[in-house]
């Protein structure tokens, strides 16, 4: 472990937006369990190897509840940010039996088979947004025209919210995910507005059920698990929004930038559409920009050993997903982009264990539809700027790229 006077500031700087910080590979090889200083000033433990990161994500002894004494705060706001914030009238569905009950109720809906039913709807939304973008002529801002609006449209449809409210959802999502960007007052207001809106939406969908997830959840009368409370339903919609909007928006832009920065990757998909699923998995595995901190932190409730280093109970541990996904101990030639890689979908981008991302089938559908549509409709697609000129988005828990401009 590093000495106290050598604790580096985290997140690390990177040479270019699409390249991971070189410190991650160095730490993974020489110091896989290390201290880092967060934007809040607090110190956390960073693990960079695949097996350690997977253990942090999957072991139920490692708590996601950072709203406790001694947990490291991530953000510069008084509440410490999304993971540290104490629940404000909504239910905590992130831990224990309540979490498992919640997952059982939702997992019936988020199956790969059910998400395939959404593929035509996602395709129609994608084509509509692309039509609007193409009507404005080249060059176009792919982030603003497609990557940002598509997932929030999908989320609104998923929970039965009017499409015209998508800008509200986008605003609430951005504000709740602040790291250094928003004030405490702005964050509190976003939570209050969001909770009030969703509470009204739950009431409306209960009385006027549609074919959306939220309507279905309001009608559940499960003999084992019972129905979800109003507070649990609000927490569910918030989880769907925060996990399904900004992260997927960022990943669409990242995917396009990653494939066009080495255009052979995009041309391979044009020539062979069967490579779309494998290409999406490699993008998910190799991306290092999606999360500002690299992975959802955990609070250790007992002493644990990672890579022969004992980490004390009471520590906050961050699994570095970008480092783990390039671990040569797990992936052969890990820095190589290979859409035919046999185990690429074993990446940790969607987590692992009890907190494995419920919405990952839908995220995969969105990414596959976007890639297939761009390859089919815009085979001449190119980045307007050089990959070195792309810039990271800063100030939020989610990272991602600033505007990605393309020509066609």
Image (spheres, grey):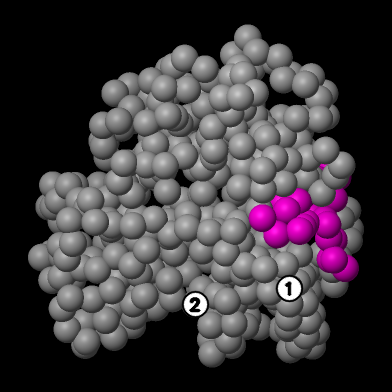
Q: Is residue 309 magenta?
A: no
Quarter of the image for the N terminus: give it.
top right
> Residue 300 at what x, y percent from top left?
77, 30
Instruction: State which mark lies toward you, 1 or 2.
Output: 1
Range of magenta residues: 76-105
Whether residue 183 is visible: yes
Disc ID at residue 185: 1
Q: Is residue 77 magenta?
A: yes
- Looking at the rendered structure, the secondary structure element under dot 2 is helix
* Residue density around tag 1, few if under 14, some if 14–19, many if 20 or more, within 10 Å: few
| SS majority, magenta | loop
Q: Earlier in the sequence, mark 1 or mark 2?
A: 2
Residue 192 located left or right of residue 242: right
Measure the alpha-carbon separation of dots 1 and 2: 27 Å
The foreground one among 111 and 382 is 382
Residue 371 located left or right of residue 101: left
The foreground one among 249 and 316 is 316
> Residue 278 at what x, y percent from top left?
32, 43
> Residue 267 at what x, y percent from top left?
13, 52
Residue 296 located left or right of residue 219: left
- Looking at the rendered structure, the secondary structure element under dot 1 is helix
Q: Residue at x 44, y 64 (%)?
A: 249
Q: Vertically, is 67 above or below 138? A: above
* Residue density around tag 2, few if under 14, some if 14–19, many if 20 or more, within 10 Å: many
Q: Residue at x 27, y 61 (%)?
A: 372
The foreground one among 194 and 346 is 194
Disc ID at residue 153: 2
> Residue 360 at what x, y percent from top left?
53, 52
């Amino acid at each position: 472990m590093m000495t106290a006077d050598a604790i580096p500031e985290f997140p690390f700087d990177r040479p270019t937006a699409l390249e991971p910080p070189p410190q991650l590979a160095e730490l993974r090889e020489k110091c896989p369990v290390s201290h880092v200083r967060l934007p809040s000033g607090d110190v956390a433990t960073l693990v960079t190897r695949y097996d350690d990161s997977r253990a942090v994500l999957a072991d139920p002894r490692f708590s996601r509840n950072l709203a406790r004494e001694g947990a490291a705060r991530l953000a510069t706001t008084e509440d410490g940010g999304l993971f540290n914030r104490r629940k404000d009238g909504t239910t905590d569905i992130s831990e224990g039996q309540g979490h498992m009950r919640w997952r059982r109720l939702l997992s019936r809906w988020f199956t790969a088979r059910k998400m395939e039913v959404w593929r035509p709807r996602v395709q129609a939304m994608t084509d509509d947004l692309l039509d609007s973008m193409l009507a404005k002529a080249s060059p176009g801002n792919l982030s603003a025209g497609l990557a940002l609006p598509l997932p929030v449209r999908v989320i609104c449809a998923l929970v039965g919210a009017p499409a015209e409210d998508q800008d509200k959802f986008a605003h609430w999502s951005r504000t709740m995910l602040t790291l250094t960007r928003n004030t405490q007052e702005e964050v509190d207001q976003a939570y209050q507005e969001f909770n009030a809106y969703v509470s009204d939406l739950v009431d409306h969908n209960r009385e006027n059920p549609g074919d959306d997830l939220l309507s279905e959840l309001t009608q559940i009368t499960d003999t084992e698990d019972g129905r979800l409370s109003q507070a649990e339903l609000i927490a569910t919609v918030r989880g769907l929004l925060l996990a399904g909007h900004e992260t997927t928006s960022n990943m669409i832009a990242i995917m396009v930038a990653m494939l066009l920065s080495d255009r052979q990757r995009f041309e391979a998909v044009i020539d062979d559409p069967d490579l779309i699923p494998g290409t999406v998995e490699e993008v998910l595995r190799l991306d290092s920009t999606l999360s500002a901190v690299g992975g959802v932190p955990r609070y250790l409730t007992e002493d644990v050993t990672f890579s022969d280093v004992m980490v004390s109970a009471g520590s906050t541990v961050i699994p570095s997903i970008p480092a783990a996904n390039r671990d040569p101990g797990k992936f052969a030639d890990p820095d190589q982009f290979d859409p035919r890689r046999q185990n690429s979908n074993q990446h940790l981008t969607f987590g692992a264990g009890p907190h494995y991302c419920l919405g990952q089938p839908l995220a995969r559908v969105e990414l596959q539809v976007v890639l297939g549509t761009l390859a089919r409709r815009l085979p001449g697609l190119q980045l307007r700027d050089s990959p070195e000129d792309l810039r990271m988005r800063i100030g939020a828990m989610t990272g991602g790229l600033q505007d990605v401009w393309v020509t066609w």
